[in-house]
Amino acid sequence: MKKLNIALIGYGFMGRTHSNAFRQSAKFFDLQYEPVLKCVCARNPEKAKAFADNWGYETVESDWRKVVERKDIDVIDIAAPNNVHAEIAMAAAKAGKMILCEKPLSMDGPEGKKMVAAVEKAGVPNSVWYNYRRVPAVTLAKKLIDEGRLGRIFHYRAKFLQDWTINPELPQGGAGLWRLDVKVAGSGVTGDLLAHCIDTAVWLNGGVDKVSAMTETFVKERKHSLSGKVEKVGIDDACAFLARFKNGSLATFESTRYARGHKALYTLEINGEHASIFWDLHDLHRLQWFDHNDEGQVRGWRNLHISDGDHPYMKHWWVPGLQIGYEHTFTHQFADFVKSLEKNDPCPPSFRDALETQHICDAVLKSGKTGRWEKVPGVK
Ligand code: SOE
C-alpha cells in the first residue's frame, strides 16, 4: 500500500471527526493508499500534543506555514476556523498539496473564488467536508432522484434546527465559540448550518436561481471571550429563505440556534410528480419513501431501513440490519477521496462545488438585508 501522509490543521470537534475517518477508512474500505497521521498543527502546543497522543499523530507543529512546506506531507486537512481556510488552502495549493477543507469553504463567495482559482491552477485534488451527502440514506435519495423515480420535482424543504445559543450570557469568540464571532465565522447559521442544507439540495436538485430571505440576530451583544468586552454580535442567529431552483421547483429553508429542544435536527423533504422522500438526521438510517406507482390499496409512506448490503456504503460495515452513524459519513468521504486519487477523478464536493453553496449563502445574507429577491451568481 502506498502511504498518504496527512497533516491536520486545527483539532476541535471537526479535527476529531476527520481523524477518526483517517483511522477507520483503510480498515473498512479496500484502499490502495494507507493514510498516515503524520502531523497535527495547532497554536496551543500542550493541547496539540495531547491530541496527537490520543489519535496517533506522529508529529506536532504550531505554525501551519511550516506544515504546508514540509516535504513529507501529501494532504493538508483544514479543520481550523473559517477565517483561516483561504490563507491555508492557497498556501497549500501553491506548495502542491492535496487539500481537504472543512465547510463552509470560505468566509464569502469572493474569497472562495480565489481558493478555487488557486487549487485549479495548482491542479491539486481538493474536497470540502459536506459530510451529510454521505449518510447512506441521503446517498440513496440521490440515486433514486437520478434514476428519475420522482419525476419532475416540485418542492424541496429543508431545516437545520439547534438551540445552543439561547443563553445571552454565552460569550462569543475563542475556542468552541468562534462560531458566534462574525469576524471568524463569516456568518451565523447561514454558513454553519444552512450551508449543509444548500450543499445537499444543490447536489440532489440542481442549481438555485434566486432567493428571498429573512435573518435575525436575537441576542445583539455578547461578551467576547478574547477581549473580555461586551461586543456587538454580527452573526445571523436565525435565517429562513425561499428559493427558486433552476429546474422550476420551489423551496423553503430554515435554520436557527434558537429552536428550544432541537439539538441538530436536519430534515429534508422532496416532493416529485411520482414520489416523495423525507429524511431526518435524528433517524439518519431511515429514508421515508412514498411512491404513487404503488398499487392503490397498499399505497403509503414506506419507512426504509438503510442498512442492507445493497444500500450505499453499507456492505463495508456490519451485517444487514445493523446501523452506522454520524461519524461514518466522514469515513465515507475520506474513503471516496482516496478512491478518487486512485482513479484520478474529482471527489465531490470540490472547492468549485462548494463555491456554489457559498454564492447561495451570500445571496441569502444579502436578501436578509435588502428584503428583496436576490439572484445567485453563477459559478460553472
Ligand atoms: C454547529 O453546532 C455544528 O457543529 C456545525 O458546525 C456542523 O457543521 C454540523 O454538522 C453540526 O453542528
Image (cartoon, helix red, strand yellow):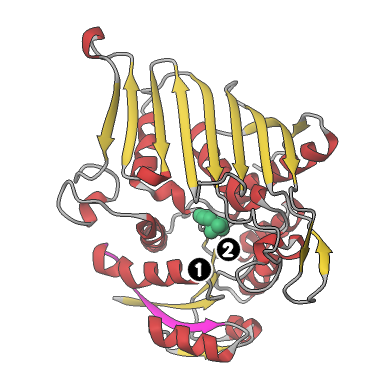
- Residue type for callout 1: Phe
In the drawing, what numbered circle is on residue 289? Answer: none
Given the image, on which type of amino acid does mark 2 rest?
A: Gly
Determine which quarter of the picture holds residue 68: bottom right
- Residue found at the far left of this picture: 319
Find residue 13 and name its label: 1
Asked if the stretch drawn in magenta spans residue 113, the answer is no
Residue numbers of the magenta segment: 29-41
In this view, 322 is above or below 292: below
Is the CB of mark 1 within 8 Å of ligand 1?
yes
- Is residue 33 inside the magenta stretch? yes
Q: Is residue 367 left or right of residue 178?
A: right
Query: Which residue lies at the image location 75% right of the left edge and 32% below the top edge?
Result: 375
x, y (%) of residue 257? 61, 49
Q: Secondary structure at mark 1?
A: helix
Evaluate whether residue 33 shows in this view: no
In this rendering, the label closer to the viewer, 1 or 2: 1
